Amino acid sequence: MKPKAVYWDMDGTLIDSEPLHEQALIAVLTSLGITPPADLHDRVVGIAARPVYDMMREEFGLDLPFDDWILRKYVYYMEHAAQLKPRPGAIEIFRDLKALGVAQAIVSNSDRLIVEINLRAIGIDAPGIKTVTRNDVRAGKPDPEPFLRAAYLTGVEPAESCVIEDSPTGATAGVAAGMRTLFWPQQTMTGPEGAVRMGSLEALREYLELD
């Protein structure tokens, strides 16, 4: 059954931005004399900025105030945002769903600044696009609140909505919101119970009844 609404995660799902996020983190850490761990990407994918900062304070000895740390990270990110590209096939699905009249929203654990930069980079920052950022909710993913807010904004019941996510954190939030959750990771990882793993772009299109 085709969903009445589709809610997209941003980083790593709609746009291939996870490498730039990692580069920004590495740049800030190394500038402070901290050696990033080899598994940095796996430990921060899908996680909001504040929990990432707290982890770095506890485990790596980061002593920079949060506001200074996030400013350095975002300055690096913005300086390199021109290199950002859509995840292959994602924008085509977004536009196909739009043409069919399916409601859509972007639901991200990133701050609004980053979401707006990303939307401009991939050319879908059209007036009226619905977005839910970490700044819009009390609790970010894995809490269901961001997706439930998206359902409120689109006027579609959670059970009639579909979530597309690339991280276990985001997929957990989608399942908790009572929505059909499609787990579409870029690398091999296990999704939460209740999420449907999409092994390929073709599988995702087929599930959404676009082919």
Image: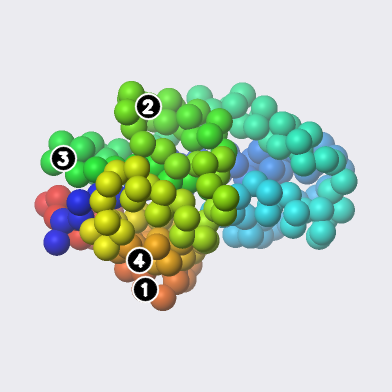
Q: CA distance from mark 4 to mark 3?
A: 22 Å
**Residue at x 84%, y 48% (from the top left corner):** 62
**Where residue 182 sits: x, y (%)?**
33, 61
Query: Which tag, 1 or 4, sits closer to the chain's start?
Result: 4
Q: Nearer the viewer, mark 1 or mark 4?
A: 4
Query: Which tag, 2 or 4, sits closer to the chain's start?
Result: 2
**Where residue 173 sits: x, y (%)?**
46, 61
Whether the residues at callouts 2 and 1 have beta carbons within 8 Å, the answer is no
Q: Nearer the viewer, mark 4 or mark 3?
A: 4
Q: How is the image coloured?
A: rainbow
Q: Amino acid at mark 4?
A: Gly
User: Please, is residue 34 above or below residue 127 in the view?
Assistant: below
Q: CA distance from mark 3 to mark 1?
A: 27 Å
Residue 75 visible here: yes
Q: Which residue is mark 2?
A: 125
**Residue at x 69%, y 58% (from the top left corner):** 38
Q: Which residue is mark 3?
A: 101
How crowded pointer 1 is (Cα within 10 Å; few <14, some 14-19, many 20+) is rated as some
Q: CA distance from mark 3 to mark 2?
A: 18 Å
Task: Determine whether, in the image, residue 110 is placed left or right of residue 159.
Answer: right
The image quadrant of residue 80 is top right
Q: Which mark identifies residue 194?
A: 1
How crowded pointer 3 is (Cα within 10 Å; few <14, some 14-19, many 20+) is rated as few
